[in-house]
Amino acid sequence: MAEFRDLPQSFRREQQELEAAGLKRWEQLRDLSDIELSRLCRSGRASARNLKRLRAIAALVCDLEMAPQDAALLMHAGIASRAALAGSTPERIVQQTGRLERSLGTGRPAVVDLPTARRWIERARQPLN
């Protein structure tokens, strides 16, 4: 599995803490327990909230073989887990991700269309290997 790098600026402190702890791969981040996340926050530089967000992104990246930017988009749009994705509809995914992009004012065309959302939902509904 790929290393996480070039995380958004809002996660730079968390990335520093993860790397200082020797964690560089998405599956390592996904597998961190709540206790391990708390230990990473002890320095005061990393926030528990951001580490939990990164762990949610890591789960989508690893479990669904999703691009990190797509996983981050879903997580920020309120679809932060495999179960949430599996229980959603393609229309809802397109609506929520589109609403997020509009609120951010990116001005770019929607990243998620119905076929993409359907593919993601199908993957989320498949059993883990």
Image (tube, grey):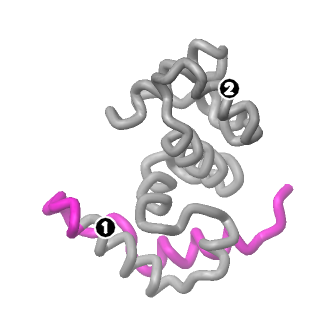
How far from the left and from the top, in percent, is residue 51?
55, 39
* Residue occupying the point 46% across, 55% down: 70
- Magenta residues? 102-129
Judge by depth and name the residue closer to the eye, 48 or 104: 48
Q: Is residue 10 visible?
A: yes
Residue 116 covered by magenta stretch: yes
How far from the left and from the top, in percent, is residue 99?
29, 74
Q: Residue 107 falls in which quadrant of the image? A: bottom left
Quarter of the image with the N terminus is top right
Name the residue tied to disc 1.
100
Residue 81 covered by magenta stretch: no
Q: Nearer the viewer, mark 2 or mark 1?
A: 2
Per the image, label 1 sits on a secondary structure element best described as helix
Under mark 1, the amino acid is: Leu
How far from the left and from the top, in percent, is residue 82?
67, 65
Distance from label 2 to label 1 (Cα)?
Answer: 32 Å
Mark number for residue 39? 2
